[in-house]
Structures are given as structure tokens and as C-alpha cells.
Image (cartoon, rainbow, N blue to C red):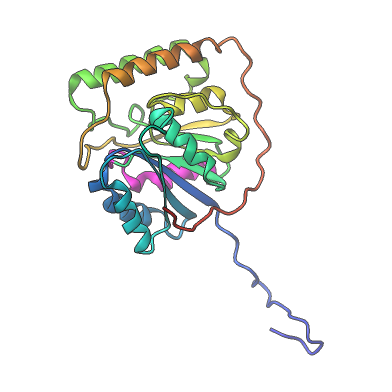
Amino acid sequence: MSGTDGERRDLPGTGPAPTRPSVTVVVPTRNESPNISVLVRRVRDALDGIVEWDLLFVDDSDDDTPDAVRAAAAAGYPVRLHHRPSGRRPGGLSGAVEDGFAASSAQILAVMDADLQHPPEVLPGLLAPILGDHADLVAGTRYADAGAASGLAGPWRRLVSSGSRVLVHALVPRSRGLTDPLSGLFAIRRDVIADVALQANGFKILLEVVTRGRWERATNFAYTFERRHAGRSKASLREGLLFGQHLLQLARLRHQAPPQPVTPRAAPSADRRSSA
């Protein structure tokens, strides 16, 4: 509305709409082509209208997963692809997540798997404590309140998972407030890992973030770990050995003072452009 003096005057109660927080959902992938389109649609349904979001696939695939991601981007979804060719995939899944963190400028970073064992519908609840300024780090948990680990294949995997939790709590004191410190589903403020030299290798990037990151408020978010939608699990004996080595490295830090949290600061809006 313009006044007689030619200056623009907003009506009471009007003005620029508040900017929604920016969130990048980092999804490490390896041969997950059949799951991509379903995942993208379900993330859109979960997050549209709540935050400014994009999906960043950090891909170590040797199949047509990159083509599936490009197809989603071409369809207009806020999707980006960072493909790591064979021979240039340091750190495995954890290295892929670290590359995703580095490629995003969003205020909030979330991590989930591509196989839909982490239901996209839980993302609003996972993000809520951070959006409400109640937490710096939120870990999805299969082992508290309404959580469930029904997607774990068989009693042996459930036993290994539970035993690993106990071992991690014993060796890494900073993890004890989290009931599922090895979860692949979590969200953090960007400041938690800003200027932090992460050194993860293998599957368990959350444990690295918990140990080395700058945070003071962490909380759990219960969810049901679903069965894999399509494809095969990437868990292997090699990944188990890498986890053991990583855990021993982190255990050596147990007597050091925890990193000091940093004052949260606004980050630039996430890059919403699709790329390949």
C-alpha cells in the first residue's frame, strides 16, 4: 500500500512472511535404485509446508541409482545428487554423510537411510525439538517409549544391536543419554559439526558426531524401524570390524573434556538447485 508521499507502507500485521528454517536431508546410497522414487515422494509429503528442505543423495552406487535420483530432480523435486565414483569413496557410508554435510549450507542437517527402514513420516517429529530450540541433536531410537526394532532381520541381529549399545555406553560416556547411539536416523544443528574434524569410517556416523561434535542438548525420538522396502542390506563382517576399530578410537577420548558448544548462528539458505 502506498501513501501520498510515495513511500510504501505495509498494513498492520502484514509484511514479509517469516523464512522457514532450511533443512537438508542427507541420504547415503549404495545400489538403492528401487527405493528412490518412493523415498522422495514420502519425504515431500512429510516436510512440505513445514521447512524449506532438500534431499541430498550422496551416492556410492554401481547400478542405476544416479539415474533414479536425476529423474526425481527432473520431475521438480528439491533433490540433489553427489555421486562418488569407484575408487573415490573414502570412509564408506560415514564418509558419504560427511561429504553431504560439506555440500549443504542448511541450518539443520538430517540423516536417514534410503531403504525406507527409517520411515520419512517421522521426519517432522525428529526435527521438532531442534525447530523448537529444545535440542542441538536428536537421535531416532528403536529402544525407548514407542520405538520398535521390528525391521531388524532375525534374533541374531537384534542381539548384536543390543549388545553393541551396551558396549558403546560403557566405552563412550557422551553417548549414555541416547538410547540408540548407533542409529542411522538423526538430526543436528549445523553448528554441532561446524569446524569439527570428523573421522568416522563405516556405518556409525552418529557415534562420531556425538563424541566429537559441539552440543549440549541431546534428546531421543522414538520410532519404529521398518522392514527394508527393496534391495539388500549392506551390513557385513567388514563393517563390523570397522565399527570395532572406530569404537576403540573413540574410547581413547573418554577422559578428554567434551567439545564446547558454540553459540547457534544463522546459516545461509540451503542450495535448492538440483545437480548431478
Q: Quadrant of residue 2?
A: bottom right
Q: As rendered, which of 24 and 237 lies closer to the eye?
A: 237
Residue at left offset 47%, top offset 41%: 100
Residue at left offset 38%, top offset 64%: 76
Q: Is residue 272 inside the magenta stretch?
A: no
Image quarter in which the N terminus is found: bottom right
Residue 217 locus on image (x, y percent):
57, 31
Residue 85 locus on image (x, y percent):
38, 39
Residue at left offset 34%, top offset 64%: 75
Q: In this image, 208 relative to 223: left or right?
A: right
Q: As rendered, which of 219 and 32 lies closer to the eye?
A: 32
Q: Is residue 120 inside the magenta stretch?
A: yes
* Residue farthest toward the left in the current orientation of the protein: 154
Write down the region rendered in magenta.
115-130
Q: Is residue 41 visible?
A: yes
Residue 193 locus on image (x, y percent):
57, 33
